Image (tube, grey):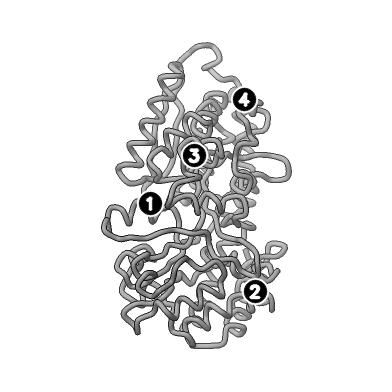
Amino acid sequence: MKAKKWVSTLSITAIVFSSVLVGCSSNDKNSSDDGEKVEITLSGWGGNPSEKKLLQQTLDDFEEKHPNIDVKLDIISDQYMDVMKTRLIGGEAADVFYLDAFEAPGLIKTGVLEPLNEYVTDEFDIEDFEKPMLEAFKKDETYYGFPKDYSTLALFYNKKMFEEAGISEPPKTWEELRQVSKQLTDGTDRFGFGVAPELARLQYIAESDGGDVVKEGKANFATEPVIDALQPIVDQHLEDKTLAEPSEVGASWGGEMFGQGKAAMVIEGNWAIPYLEDTFPELEYGTAEVPQINGKQSTMAYTVAYVMNKQSEHKEAAWELISYLTGKEGMETWTSKGFALPTRKSVAEKLGYDEDPLRSALVAGAPYATVWQDSPNLPIITNNFNNQFISAYLGERPLDEALKDAQKQANKEIKKN
């Protein structure tokens, strides 16, 4: 995941806080309470045509049920968070906007998000959310957003290749995965396992021996437990030669590598399912929960929330929109085609995703997933990890040396930030 440099926390806090003070007395009153029609703006990034259609349908349903609220959809197609942060500083941000969990700690810290606890009712049924996704937008006991959807990672495996190799079922442990990778590899034409050698995809593995990638806001990945946990990835690439990253076989990402038959197994998210259906419709594949490491089930999760701008002049209307989009009815519409998974357990069950042949493994991982976020310094930590881990992956230097240099540089940059 591309990391972005955050605007100075101190400067944005000061500017926004002063703006809030100036506008607070007039902004707290919501004109929709008087029965007057109001317009609120929703900012987000674009999606594929089917996703755009689903979102518009959800917003149309909302407006029909809330005739006094119009929603203006504002799509930011490039540099989304940079644009949002600039608008927040300038007091021009939307009433409601998308927020990736990766960016949440930094934005919550600035104080630009409206705390949502006082808006929540029993009817909203907060216990219905998958807990890791809900907790991603919470600090202490305060909720700053509610997750609209998510994806975990699952093991995608080629059924035909498994059958030809005499393998009856997907591996249940990492040791089994490494073993069957040998049976499934065919020189450099096909690798048993395709991997994305980056922290966003490897954090759950890195922490599987009890280590912490981030500790007290600083890089902490050059520790023995983290190095020991990641070494098998490097070894499988350099020694077994049964593992490759997409660029090594001319693919741009794991789904393409898998669809082209250049990897018999990859670990990908829900986004790969519609891609494979459209691009490789003849492919026979299955999904399974990510193999256990050290007897423990683990995976990653990626989630996005709807949050409210603290400077919004229409907070009650903004909450009506958030509560509809993350409520059971709106979420069911948005996730009905399977492009995204619902963060509400009841919606996943109603849509049958908990029993779906391809999506059930992804849903099963939700309760124990590690959400891709940590401290506000995670972008710095990720950049430095990725820059040095790849050198070890390629065999240019030992893993422990690479990660020690990366950790030193990351913490140096954090100190200056």
* Mark in front: 3 vs 4: 4
Whether label 3 touches label 1, CB < 8 Å: no
Q: Position of residue 183 (x, y in %)?
A: 42, 79
What amino acid type is highlighted by mark number 4?
A: Glu
Q: Is residue 227 left or right of residue 338?
A: right
In what quadrant of the picture does the C terminus appear? bottom right
Q: Position of residue 194 (x, y in %)?
A: 42, 71
Q: Earlier in the sequence, mark 4 or mark 2?
A: 4
254 or 79, nearer to the observer: 254
Per the rendering, the mark at residue 97 is: 3
What amino acid type is highlighted by mark number 3?
A: Phe
Q: Element under label 4? A: helix
Does the rendering let one see residue 14? Answer: no
Disc 4 target residue = 123
306 or 84, nearer to the observer: 306
Residue at 61% x, 70% y: name it: 206
306 or 299, nearer to the observer: 299
Q: Residues within 10 Å of mark 3 (few under 14, many from 20)?
A: many
* Mark in front: 2 vs 3: 2
Residue at 59% x, 61% y: name it: 378
Compared to residue 336, the image places residue 11 above or below, namely below
